[in-house]
């Protein structure tokens, strides 16, 4: 829905404020994910995590029809509370269930299925709004489609197999301990949260969360309704491409050295994100003076502005895959994976909450683009060193598994 540009609303301020509230609650429940999962298991936590989603588009529907805002804020709270559990579990499943050498592609598969919902929603939004060639809000029918899709999550989540029911292709089983005492769980979270690998990745986690407010606000500020609907659709398409690119580069054996593949992927991410934010600052410096209303009927002007949006989404997609690939190779334990995923999503959602809060002020987009630029270059050296740490950890785990197989014989 954020692919529509601030949830399809005419004014960015309401939805940016609502998103700040949503992600603030998510920050808390993301960190609580391991405790809930420990108590009721992966499957029920995933299903529980989907309950609050439909109220958010319901609030946007009511606002679209009547101008009322109360359900937007209530939906933000309910979605934030439940989505934190959902986010922590889905990340742990994607990184903890597959073997290590498949995790980049499994993460890409996860994002593909997640983006498939966005593609359907974006296609519906584009079909409904394709004639609206002016700025404004999307048609109310758009929200009805999102509500219907999100109501299915409660039932689909119950189809997940818990870790103890899963066997990998190499015939290894997944061990996920249950009924851990809350003090022991807290100690484990503290141990992982203060590890060098996670601390080095914190700037990248924060950067990834912070910048998510910018593309939607940019889309809502400068583009017509039908162009925003196209943006929602293309957001999922290019995001899927980006995550498969990142996952394939780290997994497929185009080079025998895992280290070379990881560093090459990181260099691609560095170049792509650096170029995107330099481009964003240049574009925003122009748009703050001209204040354009961009529609696909004016192909030249539209292409420059929309191209930036697509590159932002590609940059986000490849960074997201890489982050999960990093934490996925820090441990082979689903118990640790749910903790790593919760730490990642908690830090990320805190960044998202602050980012949307800043955009809700409102803040000039040239300032936001400049901050994004600065945060990226701050995260860059830490992320590179973290990449080396992750590769070392991967090699260590590989040797431990080989020694374990020898001992079994």
Image (cartoon, grey):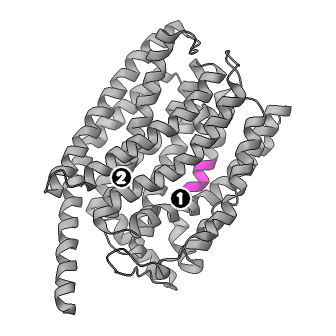
Q: To which residue does mark 1 refer?
A: 87
Considering the image in quadrants, where does the C terminus appear? bottom left
Q: CA distance from mark 1 to mark 2?
A: 14 Å
In percent of width and height, residue 137 lies at 71, 26
Where residue 1 sits, quadrant-wise, is: top right
Where residue 369 sits, quadrant-wise, is: top left
Outermost residue toward the right in this view: 66
Instruction: Give the magenta-colored segment's residue range.
Output: 22-29
> Which residue is more in the foreground, 396 or 350?
396
Outermost residue toward the top in this view: 290
In percent of width and height, residue 65 lies at 84, 33
In percent of width and height, residue 4 lies at 61, 33
**23 in magenta:** yes
Mark 2 closeness class: few <14, some 14–19, many ≥20 residues within 10 Å: some
Tell me if 122 is positioned left or right of 196 in this view. Answer: right
Choose the circle earlier in sequence order: 1 or 2: 1
Q: To which residue does mark 2 refer?
A: 323
Report the residue at 47% width, 63% height from top.
342
Report the residue at 52% width, 86% height from top.
179
Report the residue at 38% width, 16% height from top.
282
Tell me if 359 is positioned left or right of 248 in this view. Answer: right
Q: Which mark is residue 222?
A: none
């Amino acid at each position: 829905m954020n692919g529509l540009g601030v949830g399809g609303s005419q004014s960015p301020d309401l939805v940016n404020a609502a998103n700040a509230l949503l992600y603030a609650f998510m920050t808390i429940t993301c960190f609580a994910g391991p405790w809930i999962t420990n108590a009721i298991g992966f499957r029920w936590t995933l299903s529980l995590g989907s309950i609050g989603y439909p109220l958010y588009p319901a609030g946007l529907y009511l606002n679209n029809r009547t101008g009322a805002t109360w359900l937007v804020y209530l939906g933000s709270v309910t979605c934030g509370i439940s989505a934190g559990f959902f986010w922590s579990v889905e990340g742990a499943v994607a990184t903890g269930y597959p073997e290590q050498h498949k995790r980049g592609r499994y993460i890409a598969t996860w994002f593909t299925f997640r983006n498939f919902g966005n593609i359907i929603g974006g296609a519906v939004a584009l079909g409904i709004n394709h004639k609206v060639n002016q700025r404004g809000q999307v048609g109310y029918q758009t929200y009805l489609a999102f509500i219907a899709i999100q109501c299915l999550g409660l039932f689909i989540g119950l189809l997940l197999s818990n870790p103890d029911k899963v066997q990998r292709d190499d015939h290894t089983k997944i061990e996920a301990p249950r009924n851990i005492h809350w003090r022991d769980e807290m100690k484990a979270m503290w141990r992982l949260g203060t590890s060098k690998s996670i601390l080095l990745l914190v700037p990248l986690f924060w950067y990834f969360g912070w910048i998510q407010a910018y593309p939607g606000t940019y889309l809502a500020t400068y583009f017509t309704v039908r162009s925003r609907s196209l943006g929602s659709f293309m957001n999922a398409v290019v995001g899927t491409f980006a995550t498969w690119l990142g996952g394939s580069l780290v997994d497929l054996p185009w080079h025998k050295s895992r280290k070379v593949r990881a560093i090459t992927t990181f260099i691609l991410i560095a170049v792509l994100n650096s170029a995107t934010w330099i481009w964003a600052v240049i574009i925003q410096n122009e748009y703050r003076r001209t204040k354009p209303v961009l529609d696909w009927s004016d192909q030249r002007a539209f292409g420059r502005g929309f191209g930036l949006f697509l590159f932002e989404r590609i940059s986000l997609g490849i960074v997201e895959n890489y982050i999960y690939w990093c934490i996925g190779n820090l441990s082979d334990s689903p118990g640790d994976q749910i903790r790593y995923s919760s730490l990642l999503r908690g830090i990320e959602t805190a960044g998202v909450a602050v980012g949307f809060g800043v955009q809700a002020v409102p803040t000039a987009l040239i300032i936001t683009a400049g901050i994004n630029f600065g945060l990226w270059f701050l995260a860059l050296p830490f992320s590179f060193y973290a990449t080396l740490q992750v590769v070392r950890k991967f090699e260590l785990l590989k040797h431990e598994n080989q020694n374990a197989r020898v001992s079994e014989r």
